[in-house]
Structures are given as C-alpha cells and as structure tokens.
Image (cartoon, grey):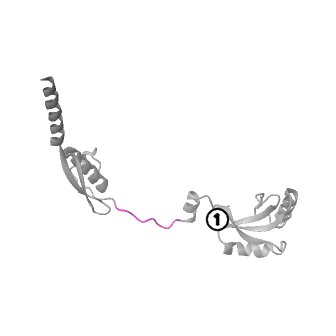
Amino acid sequence: MNQFLKIISVLFFVASNTYDAQLVVKNDTISGTPLSISMDKKVDELLGNIEDKCLTGRDSNNDNSSTKPSTPKIAVPEKELSKAEICRRNPRIMGYKIQLAVVKSNEEAREVGMFFRRRFPNMKVEIDASLRPNYKVMAGSYLTKQSAAADLAKIKAHFNSAIAIQYRVFCVEAK
C-alpha cells in the first residue's frame, strides 16, 4: 500500500508539471528558423512584454506609458566632429614633428635644443630617448605634413638634416 501511494504521488507530480508547460513556437530573429520551446504560458507572456519594451523603449514603471502608445527610438547619425571635440576624445593623436637631429648623448641633445630655442623661441623642443643610446631632438607639433612644411623650410636654413616625421602629438598643441 505504501508503494502504491508513492507511485501515485510521483505520477501526479509528473502529470501536473506537463500540464502547466506548453509547447511554444517562436521564430529566430536572425535567420527566421522556427524554435520549439516547452515553457509555461505565463513565462512566454512575460518574455513577450520584455521584448516589446526593448523594441519600443517603453518603461513599465511609468503610469503614462500604458495610456500613450510609445514610438520607437530613432537613431540619429553622428555629425562631423570639430577639432575641439576630437581633442577631447583623443588628447594624443598621430601627427608630425620636425626631427632636428639624432645625437649620441643626452648632453649633445640638450645643446642642440638650446641652439634651436635661441633661433626659434616660439617653438617647443622635445628630446626623445626611445632609441638609446641615440637621442632624437624634435620640434613643433603638426596635424599634417603639409602644415609642418612652412616651419620645416625655415628650420632647414639652420639644420640641413631636418625632416618631418610621424609622431604622437598632443592634439591641442598641434597646428
């Protein structure tokens, strides 16, 4: 008798679970393939409500949303950014600097920098030690090679080997 009650309770449990679950057929959003899912009808309705909110951007906590039909969000294409907006997003960009000389020691690099500052006091000089034991002495910051051409012509009078090289520059300082 005890075995009989156990079997009936297990059968009742299995039957009640299969009774609540239903077969729901949905279409895949990417390829359109039909998907068969076994779930409760209430769960299907909740998922449908969430999908509708995602599509329309409607919030269920807002009381006015149930009375007013909401419109889908409109994607606005981005406008072309100004130089100031570009600089705010990326303070360091790939630009150009004028390489004055490549020397063997830090002292020589400082001497070249001081010589350059006496001739061109309005231009910034930078010493790059990334090629140790050699040091690069560079001047200015430019967005394009064409914008560096005018200053390069003036500098070539004192530094014959000066060239414009691609280098990371601060966007705000660049011409």
The residue at 13%/31% (across/down) is 8
Above or below: residue 84 compared with residue 12: below
Q: Does the image show residue 122?
A: no
Count the numbered circles shown.
1
Instruction: Report the predominant secondary structure element of the magenta stretch.
Output: loop
What span is colored magenta in the figure?
Answer: 74-81
Percent x, y for residue 158?
Answer: 85, 72
The residue at 46%/66% (across/down) is 79
Q: Is residue 44 left or right of residue 132?
A: left
Which image quarter holds the N terminus? top left
Callout 1: SS: strand
Percent x, y for residue 97?
Answer: 72, 67
Q: Quadrant of residue 168?
A: bottom right
| Residue bearing the label numbered 1 | 94
The residue at 30%/56% (across/down) is 55
Front residue of 127 and 70: 127
Above or below: residue 105 compared with residue 79: above
Q: Is residue 78 magenta?
A: yes
Front residue of 129 and 66: 129
Q: Residues within 10 Å of mark 1 (few under 14, many from 20)?
A: some
Q: Is residue 167 magenta?
A: no
Which image quarter holds the C terminus? bottom right
The residue at 65%/71% (across/down) is 144
Percent x, y for residue 159?
Answer: 83, 72
Q: Amino acid at mark 1?
A: Met
Q: Is residue 94 left or right of residue 40?
A: right
Q: Is residue 110 left or right of residue 17?
A: right
